[in-house]
Amino acid sequence: MPSTITLRSVVDYNRTRVRMVQLVNVGGIPNQPALDICNDVLQTLLSAPNNWKFNKSELPPFTTIPNQQDYWVSGACAAVDRKASVSINAMLAETPGLIPDSQGYVLVNYDRFAPHGIQGKGTSSMPPLFAINDWVTISGAGNGAYNGTFQITAVPSKNSFVYYVGQTDLLPDGGQGINSWGWMERSSLEDYLSTAWVKPVREILAVYGLPQESIIQPPFKVCLQFERVLQCAPLAMSELLIRFWPVPSSQIWRALLFYQLKAQLRTSLDDNWAPWPDDLSYVLRSGVYAKALEHAEDPRSPMADQKWQQDIARGLGIKDREERHEAFFVDLPIMRGG
């Protein structure tokens, strides 16, 4: 359950513990330093390596393209079963992902994700190209009228198609951005075109960064390589560049990428601590206490910080009591490189 506790209540409680040191409106600056202390606490709690289950999210799944290493993702997808799942262009991209016309048809663009189409560079014939009469599922558009399952009516290029939505009053749309990415926690690849009842899935390493590569084989590393912020006042959204290593081959994989959300900046002491749950509020109180003592230059500050770290570890233990399953991956070479 998300937090119902406000920043102000935690600050007021801790003032009684730091000899009533003033934490609000110091020097006539509204809400300071209490507001910054609370933001520092929340950002620390939600940063790596603290992998809280209540703070986890999944990137909209997409499929790899033969001979393509980098993939721009925007938060909206178009998926045709047994063919591909692509990320369509962001709403604020140079060419929006969804462009309606006056007859109720919608042009879908995914050239940011697949500049050479879903078969990539070279002579690969897999997966089959999107075609007229294919059923496509659209998800993640800002306007829900675009989302759903539709039949493709035209394929004007290798990285676009058209479907009929029936409404004539729509505005251009597309991916709404991946705006809360904190850090990648874990990642897997699923054999997308497998006909097995249970499709083969293999875990791969989530790393900080990867170089460009020319070796082509099933990838075993992935990273967020770059975040691009698109702006058109008052809107702003992020599209992410996901890079695999080595370069994916003609085998088509569905990427399953899980990440921790970043802390959202609080602007008022009357905001709550979401997504932090009420049952771990003692960790918040401990963190604000340590930061308040640091602000007051109190000699108890180092000891309070140690206590806070212990409370964080205890909170992780409560939320993640299960043992980690990893032991030894026999399918990966020991000398697999950095």
Image (cartoon, rainbow, N blue to C red):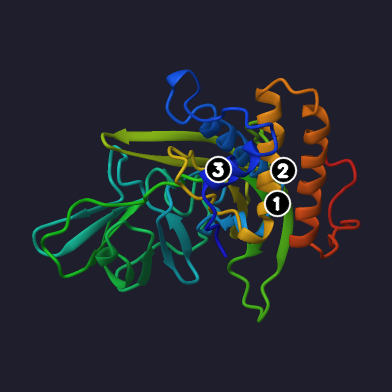
Residue 233 position, x and y percent, is 26, 34
Which is more N-terminal, label 2 or label 3? 3
| Amino acid on which disc 2 is placed | Ser
Left or right position of 231 against 128: left
Considering depth in this image, is 127 or 113 the residue closer to the camera?
A: 113
Q: CA distance from mark 3 to mark 2?
A: 18 Å
Q: What residue is at 48 percent from the left and 18 percent from the top?
A: 27
The label on residue 282 is: 1
| Amino acid on which disc 1 is placed | Tyr
Choose mark 3 or mark 2, whichever is in front.
Answer: 2
| Label 2 Cα neighbours within 10 Å, binned few <14 / some 14-19 / many ≥20 | many
Considering depth in this image, is 272 or 234 the residue closer to the camera?
A: 272
311 versus 256 height, above or below: above
| Label 1 Cα neighbours within 10 Å, binned few <14 / some 14-19 / many ≥20 | some
- According to the picture, the residue beneath numbered tag 2 turns out to be 286
| Label 3 Cα neighbours within 10 Å, binned few <14 / some 14-19 / many ≥20 | many
Farthest top residue in view: 27
223 versus 164 height, above or below: above
Residue 154 position, x and y percent, is 24, 63
Say whether residue 57 is visible.
Answer: yes
The C terminus: image quadrant = top right
